Image (cartoon, grey):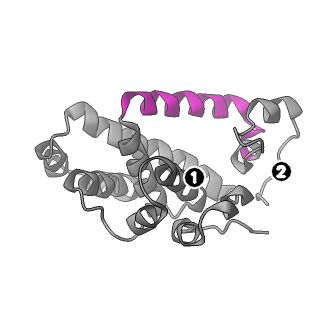
Amino acid sequence: MAFIGTPKDPEFFEQNRAPAGHVPNFVTTFAARPAVFDAWKQLNGAIKESMDLRRYELATLAAATALKSSYCSLAHGQVLADKYYTAEEVAALVTEPPNDPVDRAVMAFARKVALSADDITQADVDALKALGLSDADVLDVVLAAAVRCFFSKTLEATGTPPDSAFDNLPEGLRTALTVGRPIHSG
């Protein structure tokens, strides 16, 4: 259970029910501040809209694992496994850089944004541009990693555990993506 209590607002929960039918734990966490949740959804949606979705998910996974956010790692690792890679390939991304040089550079850059943005240099940006990313592409990676910092840190600081629905992931993938708080905490 989360560290803080939240109001029981059936309308808010119904409006934010997951496609699979359950109310995600993060929705419960934000129930006390629905305007913040709506603003985050709008901001995150605007960032995703401007990016290649696979690159968004890679940058997000890199930031989430760097931040030790199991919730976000599980959620975005699941998207990558459902749409772009095998479960084994996604599990490997947690500890091994991808083979593709662009993906490898994007993930390393997103991790650096999440952990030490003040250490980013022109050389870091130039390295991405040398691989074919535009200034806008680099900004997109920064935005994806930065917005993940807000969301991951909010969930971690409030003790929001990952949804039990993640129990349905293949065991190897679930284990690899559980980089911090366990699915079942209490």
Q: Residue at x 46, y 51 (%)?
A: 80
Numbered disc 1: secondary structure: helix
- Residue 94 position in % (x across, y down): 42, 66
Span of residues in magenta: 29-51
Q: In this view, does 65 lie to the left or right of 186?
A: left
Residue 136 placement: quadrant: top left
Location of residue 186 with respect to 141 vertically, above or below: below
Q: Residue at x 73, y 50 (%)?
A: 25
Q: Residue at x 51, y 30 (%)?
A: 45
Quarter containing the C terminus: bottom right
Q: Look at mark 2 in the image and give the residue it sits on.
A: 5
Q: Residue at x 36, y 33 (%)?
A: 51
Q: Look at mark 1 in the image and give the residue it sits on.
A: 75
**Residue 31 belongs to magenta span:** yes
- Residue 79 position in % (x across, y down): 52, 48
The earlier-in-sequence mark between 1 and 2 is 2
Which is in the foreground here, disc 1 or disc 2?
1
Q: Which residue occupies the foreground of this view, 146 or 169? A: 169
Q: Mark 1 and mark 2: span between their CA atoms? A: 23 Å
Q: Is residue 6 left or right of residue 43?
A: right
Numbered disc 2: secondary structure: loop
* Label 1 crowd bin: few (<14), some (14–19), many (20+), radius 10 Å: some
**Mark 1: which amino acid?**
Ala
Q: Is residue 33 left or right of residue 58?
A: right
**Mark 2: which amino acid?**
Gly
